[in-house]
Image (cartoon, rainbow, N blue to C red):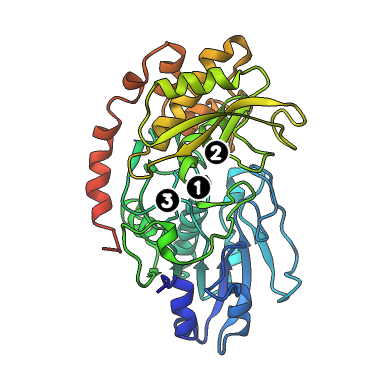
Amino acid sequence: MAVRFGIDVWVKQRFRALKGLRVGAIVNPTSVDASFRHLVDLLHEADGVTLGALFGPEHGIRGEAQYMVAVGDVARDRRTGVPVYSLYGSTFESLSPKAEWLKGLDALVFDIQDVGARYYTYIYTMALSMKAAAKAKVPFFVLDRPNPIGLDLVQGNLVGKRYRSFVGLYELPTRHGMSAGEIATLLNARERFGCELTIVPCEGLKRSMSWGQVGRDFISPSPNMPTPATALVYPGMCLGEGTNVSEGRGSCRPFEQFGAPWLSSHDVAEQLNALDLRGVTFRPCSFTPTFDKFKGESCEGAFLHVTDPRTFDPFVTGIAVFQTCRELGGRDFAWRADAYEFVDDIPAFDLLCGTAKVRQGIEGGWPLARIVAGFQDELRPFLALRKKHLIYG
């Protein structure tokens, strides 16, 4: 039996929690039920429910905008006629709903698929919307969904205060092992949002389940997140956004492969395989991006084959990948220097890592074990806090 998502629970209940209310919905293409019906259409057609506004996160309501591309407001949704507002503009202030947008709403509903990594911005759209809803005294509902990379493994480190950004707005691990609903309850308590929060949990979901056991198709939540396999490597390979190495954007397997015109695929794969990292093997590969870094140029690098998802640590693997790229690339390798996610005075790689230690360790020639030393100890207080807010057994 397939897991029933939060939206499916409400469909079964005929949206009775929203009867008589004027509702705003934070959605994207993943906001569909088991029959692939979109929440917008379901709310629009629900008896006694008035759909008052739609809000779109990064990549937009239709999910077509590339990463870090500001999305403008659309005056009206063509299908329902309701106002559409963007929660991903050109400034940090544009990431939160404006007070005037929430006027007249009786509830705000969030239903978007997360992918389980700290960098993925939808959980911060949720959090900032919760804060705005609390200020406007609008109840907030999260229709929960499974985490495609699992609910039982927590890996990486925590974001330091200096390194907070829209890819790490709160003190969360690189791989948090939580659902969006669980994160919402944790942040509402720890950050004292004061939000009137209701989670609509999944039914039949267990912490040990992989996406394959959930029994549902995976709908791409953003243009470069096509499969659960992409999501699994993402907590490490997203670090490539902080370098001039292609993280595979513009190819058919983003984040699963990486490369640059100045690398040798066999040298890269040989050096990485020599590290004997747990749960992963590297295969030499080449690709030519159709957009983004090195558009139209042949890039050599490697493809990550995850051989054991239970022992694979994507963050440690990602650090090893870009440490190797720097060592083999020499002067051709560079850290990203332009503004990243609304921050222009801290290197993008540091924002993603949540610390400068990783970049400094790579530059200092430290062995991988020294760079990642202490990460697990750092997670212990978070693990204790996390335990209090888990929904699924």
The alpha-carbon separation of the residues under discs 1 and 2 comes to 8 Å
Quickly name the residue at label 1: 229
Horizontally, is 266 left or right of 73 in the view?
left
Q: Earlier in the sequence, mark 1 or mark 2?
A: 1
Question: CB under 8 Å between callouts 1 and 2?
Answer: yes
- For disc 3, the neighbor class at 10 Å (few under 14, some 14 to 19, many from 20) is many
**Amino acid found under the numbered disc labelled 2:** Glu
Q: Residue at x 44, y 24 (%)?
A: 273
Quickly name the residue at label 2: 256
Query: In the image, residue 178 lies at what x, y percent?
Result: 36, 54
Q: Residue at x 64, y 43 (%)?
A: 67
Quickly name the residue at label 3: 149
Question: CB under 8 Å between callouts 3 and 2?
Answer: no
| Front disc: 3 or 1 | 1
Q: What secondary structure is marked by label 1?
A: helix
Find the residue positioned furthest to the bottom.
47
- For disc 2, the neighbor class at 10 Å (few under 14, some 14 to 19, many from 20) is many
| Front disc: 3 or 2 | 2
Q: What secondary structure is marked by label 3?
A: loop
Horizontally, is 191 left or right of 137 in the view?
left
User: Which is more toward the observer, 274 or 52?
Assistant: 274
User: Relative to 293, does residue 254 appear above or below in the rendering?
Assistant: below
Q: Residue at x 75, y 65 (%)?
A: 75
Q: Earlier in the sequence, mark 3 or mark 2?
A: 3
Q: Residue at x 59, y 22 (%)?
A: 265
Q: Earlier in the sequence, mark 3 or mark 1?
A: 3
Q: Is residue 356 something one can see in this rendering?
A: no
Query: In the image, residue 128 lies at what x, y percent?
Result: 49, 54
